Image (cartoon, rainbow, N blue to C red):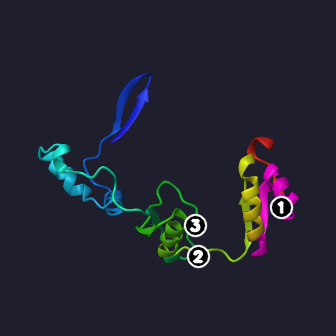
Amino acid sequence: MQFAVFKGELYVIEANPRASRTVPFVSKAIGLPLARLACRLMLGETIAQLDLPEEPLGDYVCVKEAVLPFDRFAGADALLGPEMRSTGEVMGIAKDFPTAFAKAQSAAGAHLPQGGAVFLSVSEGDKVLAGALASQLHDLGFRVIATRGTAEAVSRMGIPAHPINKIPEG
């Protein structure tokens, strides 16, 4: 269900009496058969009767990634619009987010570029980390493009960075 609150009033925007593809993903991620549990609730059991664990199961991170069909359609425009749907999904599971994300990307068939340009724009507190990242990317042969403040911080660390304006800057 989707809800909205407007001027203190609660509105139901949408109610879909169906399970999307997200339900099996979440079920696997937390180790509980959500569709079966939902059916039991609809048949009259209470949440207390389901004997649910206090915390979701598993000491891991799960990442869901869409699998898009661009490789199936030669010459297809890779820019997504509202009519573009994924043809499937994959799950990356690991002890930490970066590894789970990498697994999901790999399973979806994503290939990291070997060159080109990267864009960086970070808050003031993250500029030191951005410098380390920019250094690694520069060493791999990528051209670094960054918003003005990030470009200045990265350049002070000895990494060439091409500055660009933010939208309100022109």
Q: What amino acid type should be assigned to the residue bearing mark 1?
A: Ala
Q: Comparing marks 1 and 3, which lies closer to the viewer? A: 1
Left or right of 96? Residue 26 is left
- Is label 1 in a helix, a strand or a loop? strand
Question: What number is the disc on residue 95?
Answer: none
Q: What residue type is labelled 2?
A: His
Q: Which residue is drawn at 85% across and 61% down?
A: 157
Where is 32 relative to 8, above or below? Answer: below
Q: Count up the numbered dots.
A: 3
Where is the N terminus found, in terms of image quarters?
top left
Q: Where is residue 21 in the image (x, y as percent from the top left)?
A: 34, 60
Answer with the quarter of the image where residue 112 lies.
bottom right
Q: What stretch is highlighted in magenta?
A: 138-162
Nearest to the observer: residue 156 or residue 163: 156
Which residue, given by chain and number where applicable, does mark 1 sit on? Answer: 161
Mark 3 neighbour density, 10 Å: few (under 14) some (14–19) many (20 or more): few
